Amino acid sequence: MQLSNIEPMPVTRDPRYADICAKVNNANVKIGKATNLARRKLDYWNDFDQENVIFEPLVKIHDLKVAEKEILRSLKQYRKTSPNGGKLEWLEGISYDVAKRMVFETLDRSGIKYTLVEENT
């Protein structure tokens, strides 16, 4: 997922966390997993407004846990750090195209079987 907004926005609109959480904009890329793509897209729209969200599901994978671990490991140097010091699924210092290429390279190198998502949800 990419954002088109220039002004940074909090990664959540939950009022308990919005003032203290990480903020992201069009310089960031989000890599993550979802079991329900339509629901995930709606969540992004709720957090960042529909006009700011560029949502592109890439692949369907049977073992999401293993795939996510390998992908996040390969993108470790680009993972944004949260204000409390944890690593996020948000990336910085990498373009969307390079991140996408690295996802496919990681899946192939790890021998993780996947199928392409045929159309955006």
Image (spheres, rainbow, N blue to C red):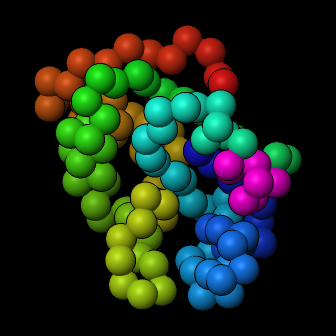
Q: Is residue 64 visible?
A: yes
In this view, 64 is above or below 81: above
Q: Quadrant of residue 54?
A: top right
Percent of width and height locating residue 14: 69, 73
Percent of width and height locating residue 102: 33, 39
Q: Quadrant of residue 6?
A: bottom right
For residue 71, side relative to residue 31 (left or right): left
Q: Main secondary structure of the magenta part?
A: helix
Membership of 93 in magenta stretch:
no
For residue 111, side relative to residue 36 (left or right): left
Say which residue appears at 77% left-offset and 72% top-offset.
7
In this view, 79 is above or below 112: below
Q: Quadrant of residue 37?
A: top right
Looking at the image, which residue sits at the far right? 51
Q: Which residues are magenta?
A: 43-49
Say which residue appears at 30% left-offset and 52% top-offset.
72
For residue 107, side relative to residue 14 (left or right): left
Quadrant placement of the N terminus: top right
Percent of width and height locating residue 31: 46, 48
Quadrant placement of the C terminus: top right
For residue 85, side relative to residue 29 (left or right): left
Membership of 48 in magenta stretch:
yes
In depth, the one of 105 and 60 nearer the eye is 60
Say which residue appears at 44% left-offset and 16% top-offset.
116
In this view, 59 is above or below 119: below
Say which residue appears at 21% left-offset and 44% top-offset.
70
Q: Is residue 52 visible?
A: no
